[in-house]
Image (spheres, grey):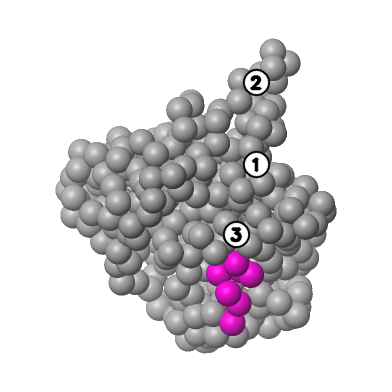
Amino acid sequence: MTATPAPTVPTATVAPPVATPSPSATTIAGRAAAIVGGMTARQQAGTVLMTAGTVDELPGLAGVVRRYALGGVMVRGRSTASVATVGSAVSAAQAAAPAGLPLLVATDQEGGEVQVLQGADFGAIPSAVTQGTWGAGRLTASAATWGSALRRAGVDLDLAPVADTPCPGITNPPVAALDRQYSDDPAAAATSVAAAVRGFAQGGVATTVKHFPGLGCVTANTDTTAQVVDDTITETSPRLRSFEAGIAAGAAAVMISSATYTKIDPGRPAVFSPVVIGDLLRTRLGFSGVVMTDDVGAAVALKAWSPGERAVRFVDAGGDLVLDIVPEDMGPMSDALTAKATADPGFATKLRAAAQSVVAARLRLAQ
């Protein structure tokens, strides 16, 4: 993806105040509910949004974070900067967050072809294919080291591990072509995914299993192609085992695919599907953490919908956190979410729940 310059924004802020929880609101969930209860609809809208910038662009995102009360930022691109340099850039963005409620700071640190932070301090992370040949103990120990470097740089959410398991006999551009899978065998992949999740947690970093319910059996990449379809995975597919394993191991987030799954919900992309998010992920798999999108800003698969529509459809389907690497999309998304919540009490309830999920994650990772 090409770098997107951070836009110049006014200094006016809608950053939410951090409400003081009542004595009974001692749990993280209670504190999150108290904080979100003190927000306006527009502040809740910003809380469920995350944009992105390169290491050099992060300081310039502070104005966007402040103006729209964003829930997080992602470090993207490729950088050879040191831990200290990355940490300084992250701190500049964090300065725009309200006291007591730091941003979620994410990056793509999978290994191999997908490693955003490549400075010597972060180590050279091998591809998932290579990691998958290691024993669980070695992978957990290595992930703890990689996670510790991220945490020292101010990054607290890794958009990894990849839980997709490729189908045999096909060309699979988004996963197999880049060696992003731990294994083609769901059981073996499940062991590695769980080991990676536990290791990053030991290093102080939360993880995101992706791309639910799987991109291993598609023949096109949702980043570059419209109407990507999977006609293999079902609600009881063995290829879900690696996602289940990551969730059981404590993954904080699950990233939803932008492909369409004809045997689960043929009428819409998974990212807009209450069947995929609600029935399958939340109910059948029992996931209670943050449900987030893949990038919806530059992805060709979602260009048929406006930025505002993408955000509204995702939250309406039961999702929590919208990742859009285009900072200019934050305004239209905030406007659309706010307008929908103001006009529709049912949607307002969903937006509030999504904001509480994101705020709870922010509080948890700040501990």
> Are there few (<14), some (14-19), or many (20+) residues within 10 Å of tag 1?
few
Q: Residue at x 69, y 34 (%)?
A: 37
Residue sitting nearer the eye, 136 or 73: 73
Q: Are marks 2 and 1 in contact (CB under 8 Å)?
A: no
Which tag, 2 or 1, sits closer to the chain's start?
Answer: 2
Which tag, 1 or 3, sits closer to the chain's start?
Answer: 1
In space, the residues marked 1 and 3 are separated at their CA atoms by: 13 Å
Which amino acid, mark 2?
Pro
Residue under label 3, please give it. Answer: 335
Residue 279, can we see it?
yes
> Are there few (<14), some (14-19), or many (20+) residues within 10 Å of tag 2?
some
Residue under label 1, please give it. Answer: 40
Magenta region: 304-310
Q: Residue at x 82, y 52 (%)?
A: 345
Q: Secondary structure at mark 3?
A: helix
Instruction: Give coordinates of residue 29: x percent, y percent.
Output: 67, 31
Q: Is residue 147 left or right of residue 245?
A: left
Which tag, 2 or 3, sits closer to the chain's start?
Answer: 2
Q: Secondary structure at mark 2?
A: loop
In space, the residues marked 2 and 3 are separated at their CA atoms by: 28 Å
Q: Is residue 341 left or right of residue 9?
A: right
Question: Which disc is residue 320 wearing?
Answer: none
Which amino acid, mark 3?
Asp
In space, the residues marked 2 and 1 are separated at their CA atoms by: 17 Å
Residue under label 2, please give it. Answer: 21
Residue placed furthest toward the right: 346
